[in-house]
Image: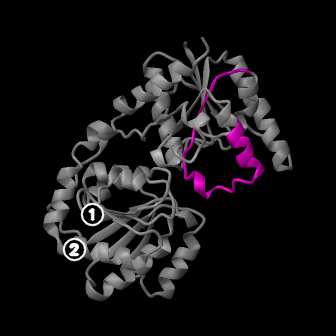
Amino acid sequence: MKNIVIVVQRLSGGGAERVASILTNYLYERGYNMLVILAYYDTREYYIHEEIKTIAIKTNKKSACARLIERNVRIYEAVKRFNADVVVSFITNEVLLTECRGIPVVHTLRNDPTRIDNSSIKTILRNFAYSNAAQVVFQTEGARQFFNNSIKNKSQVIFNPLMTDMLPTWNQFTESKTFITACRLNKQKNIPMMIRAMKKLHEFYPEYRLDIYGSGEEKNSIEKLINEFHCEYYIALKGHSTDIHSIMANSFAFVMSSDFEGLSNSMLEALTIGIPCICTDSPPGGARTFIENYKNGLLCQVNNDEDLYEKMKYLIENKDRRLEFKKNNQNLKKKLCVENICKQWELVITKSAKK
């Protein structure tokens, strides 16, 4: 088994794309021939070795159905020309033709399956794809348990790999009074909950602030809410940063307020860096998989800004617990390192390939 194809929307912007790039580089360095297919956008923020061939799929069809069919055809043709032994797909319905033509496909789900309309045609196609997959990789056990036994029996839970050797360590002596978050600014992340909690915290601890890193379609509405609450002096939209890990390492605490989340890379990075973390206990359970409440971080209720405020206040008032959280997360560097996680992927991929 030598030829592996990775199918992904793009090589920029999100956690799935980052995992895809890390996995691609790892497998290439292990001696496999790699092809990356960018199914939607020819954007390449995340590094892959220059020698790895990439193909960007373009379609000019007007209807969504016609575009999906054309993408299926073009992806299958590329996979066939490459003589692929196995395909690893970070998107689902675009590789149905490839799967139906007998090429083994490893699917991976990167979000909460309970938040998807299970009556929609896309979901029907997804369930068909998973039923015919060689293997399905989930990020959490909660996501895996959503599916029937025929899918669960050929699935694995594999966490996200982190380049842990490049992550700094939280400066526990920092005098920073800044809570930070780093995420895509969309409705799923529920940034308004965080703003409301920070507004209340400011009444009692006016020296603390919140910096929000990231971009997305909700930026304007978030900015409007900050101005409506007159919070612009202590809540700031900071945009995208190429130095986010260093910023984390020198901030007071990390906050995540998602309504639902596959498995947040930002949360995993923050925990591994050692900065105190407060995260919503959102489905399908990514946060609770890694955070034991009051032992190595804090969990708060989804869409409950009062609870988030209380947890932020708790961190301010309990320095010893902040230091304890850092100590109790020291094992994550080894657990989530590229070598450990990508070995698990390699086993799944080689098991799934054409015999």
Please state which of residues 250 and 198 is positioned toward the viewer in this rendering: 198
- Using residue 30 as the reference point, say whether residue 40 is left or right of it: right
Quarter that holds the N terminus: top right
Q: Determine whether 196 is above or below 23 in the image.
A: below
Tell me the residue at 49%/75% (across/down).
192
Q: Residue at x 55, y 30 (%)?
A: 154
The spot of residue 156 in percent (x, y) is 48, 34
Q: What residue is shown with label 2?
A: 316
What's the amino acid at mark 1? Ser
Which contiguous range is marked in magenta?
Answer: 102-128
Q: Label 2, secondary structure: give it.
A: helix
Q: Classify 19 as above or below 192.
A: above
> Disc 1 on helix, strand or loop?
loop
Residue 8 % position (x, y): 61, 38
- Callout 2 amino acid: Ile
Task: Say whether residue 243 is visible.
Answer: no
Q: Nearer the viewer, residue 91 or 222?
A: 91
Q: Quadrant of residue 208?
A: bottom left
For disc 1, the neighbor class at 10 Å (few under 14, some 14 to 19, many from 20) is: many
* Residue corresponding to mark 1: 251
Q: Position of residue 319 (x, y in %)?
A: 15, 68
Where is residue 164 shown, x and y percent of the image?
A: 31, 40
Colour mapping: one colour
Q: Residue at x 46, y 75 (%)?
A: 193
The span from disc 2 to disc 1 (Cα, nearest Å) is 13 Å
In-image side of 190 versus 210 (left or right):
right
Residue at x-position 23% and y-position 70%: 315
